[in-house]
Amino acid sequence: MALRGLLATMLAAAVVGAGAAAATPGATIRGRLQKAHYPIYAPPGASAIRPRPQDTFYTVADFASAHAFWFLVYVYATPAIAASAQEALSEKIVSGPSRVGRDGRTVFLGTTAPLNRTQGLPPVLPARDFARLVALAEGR
């Protein structure tokens, strides 16, 4: 009887441990966005991103508005690599139509440019809309 209890405890611990190992930051964020009914896509040219993320995907937000935007998620191996990637992105983006943020190993990029091909600059991405999606992705 004691052996059966010990085996049951070990099996339960193994199942819990396996579930925790499977929940990567990218998978967790992807799940939160999907639960909120955001479709998830693989970004074009993802293999060319440097530094190379461990996971990357995007969704489209505020699609029916005048400032629809791509919300890209890049998950890196370490916070230091993510900080380096954030810095590189910040140097390349145009403030206003694009916003970038970071939380630990994850870099978030919001940009209206791909969805709003107009003469001149694309529309400004409102800070509150970007912050709302970052908060959802982070589980806040």
Image (cartoon, grey):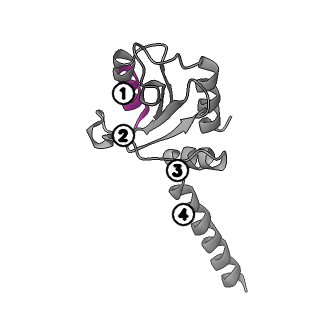
Q: Which residue is mark 2?
A: 53
* Element carrying mark 3: helix
Q: Residue furthest front?
A: 119
**Which of pointers 2 and 1 lies earlier in the amino acid sequence?**
2
How crowded is the residue under tag 3: few (<14 C-alpha within 10 Å), some, or many (20+)?
A: few
Front position in the image: 16 or 56: 56
Disc ID at residue 18: 4
Give the mark nearest the N terminus, 1 or 4: 4
In the shown orientation, is residue 120 left or right of residue 18?
A: left
User: How far is the residue under mark 4 from the one under mark 2?
Assistant: 23 Å
What is the three-letter code of the residue carrying label 2?
Pro
Q: Amino acid at mark 4?
A: Ala
Query: Quadrant where the C terminus lies?
Result: top right
Foreground pick, 102 / 8: 102
Q: Which residue is mark 1?
A: 85
The disc label shown at residue 125, or none: none
Cβ atoms under marks 2 and 1 closer than 8 Å: yes
Disc number lying in front (4 or 3): 3
